[in-house]
Amino acid sequence: MHPSVWYRDDFGPRLSPACRLVYNRWSGIADTDLPAHLHRVRDRAWPVGQYPCIGQWMFLLPGLAGFPEFPSMVDLVRQREATVLDLACGLGQDLRLLAAHADGAPTARWWALDLEPRLWELGYELFGDRDRMAAHFVAGDFRTLDLTGDSPLGPLRGHVDLIIANQFIHLFDQADQREVIQRIMGLSRPGTMVVGFQQARRQPRADARPWGTMFFHSRDSFVALWESVQHDTATEWTVQVREVDLRRDWGLQEEDVAWMPADQVGIEFVFVRSH
Ligand SMILES: C[S@@+](CC[C@H](N)C(=O)[O-])C[C@H]1O[C@@H](n2cnc3c(N)ncnc32)[C@H](O)[C@@H]1O
């Protein structure tokens, strides 16, 4: 599949109220200036990250703000000591979503990781917050990154409250997805919450992409994978995985799903470690 199928010229109706609030309140950008600003930064991000999340403006959708658990995420990050990790942060919109809705929450104990540091850099321009977003950025491949001792993410091991994995785990084949989940569990402690959303299929299957093989889970196969890794790591989690409709629940447009097979759905997950 060629990435050009994911490129949409205009953001059209995709800017959700929850994200508009981030640009207005956190970034101080007026509605009149927003369209030109969004186009300018998005068009610089596209050559760096040719994913649907950028080409189809998915970074403007409600994302975590559409979860019924979003208020409890906001309450959690309002706590001064809350430690947050955004895996595959892209432009970093999810940390800004939390920062804007948590109104003044401290961000110095927040971390963002991505393979592509230029996307995180463009995030400072997108949100105009280099002076206020104090999150630490780590560049690297989460599948192989050193997570021990005094490596950049080492201090988070056993101390992270909230891990965000939006549109991330599904990027890989089944073996790498297992590895990623094992690593997430390795960073956790009892009480850690792991949240995210990704594309899924009613019939689970692999599909080729420019960056490698993706395995698209169904709701049930994703639960089975999580529970299998939970067994291997001797941890226990409360597991909530919801199947959602990409148009009704996320706000994707007809043209955004036209390249997907007929059994396309989304899954949203919230895992909380109990033991
Ligand atoms: C589909 S985008 C999702 C970005 C963001 N979380 C969102 O929901 O819009 C995928 C992101 O994963 C990053 N990525 C891909 N492979 C990665 C890896 N192995 N480790 C860390 N980040 C990776 C890409 O650079 C890109 O920013």
Image: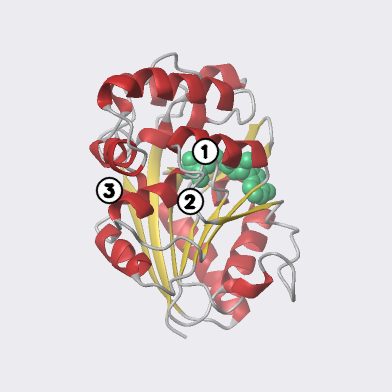
Q: Which residue is depicted at the point 35% across and 20% down? A: 35
Could you say which is closer to the camera, residue 105 or residue 118?
105
Q: Position of residue 12 (x, y in %)?
A: 31, 18
Residue 19 is left or right of residue 6, and the answer is left
Report if the CB atoms under discs 1 and 2 are less than 8 Å apart: yes
Disc 1 marks which residue? 123
Q: SS class of the residue under badge 2? A: loop
Relative to 255, residue 135 above or below: below
The answer to whether the residues at label 3 and label 1 have Cβ atoms under 8 Å apart is no
Residue positioned most to the top: 9
Which residue is pictured at 42% across the width and 23% down the height? 37
Q: What separation in Å lies between label 3 and label 1 (alpha carbons)? A: 21 Å
Q: Which of the two discs, 1 and 2, labels the residue nearer the N terminus?
A: 1
Which label was assigned to residue 66?
3
Residue extending farthest front:
131
Q: In which quarter of the image is residue 215?
A: top right
Q: Which residue shows up at 36% across the image and 45% down it?
A: 63
Q: Can residue 214 be seen in this view?
A: no
Among numbered discs 3 and 1, the one appearing first in the sequence: 3
Residues under labels 3 and 2: Cα distance?
23 Å
- The quarter of the rendering in which ligand 1 is drawn is top right
Viewer-side label of 3, 1: 1
Point out the image quarter for the N terminus. top right
Residue 200, x across and y down, in percent: 45, 44
Residue type at numbered disc 2: Met
Q: Which amino acid does label 1 sit on?
A: Gly
Q: Position of residue 95 (x, y in %)?
A: 44, 51
Q: How dense is the environment of label 2, judged by Cα within 10 Å: few (below 14), some, or many (20 and up)?
A: some
Q: What element carries label 1?
A: helix
Task: Determine which residue is flagged by label 2.
Answer: 133
Q: Which mark is residue 17?
A: none
Q: Residue at x 53, y 81 (%)?
A: 235
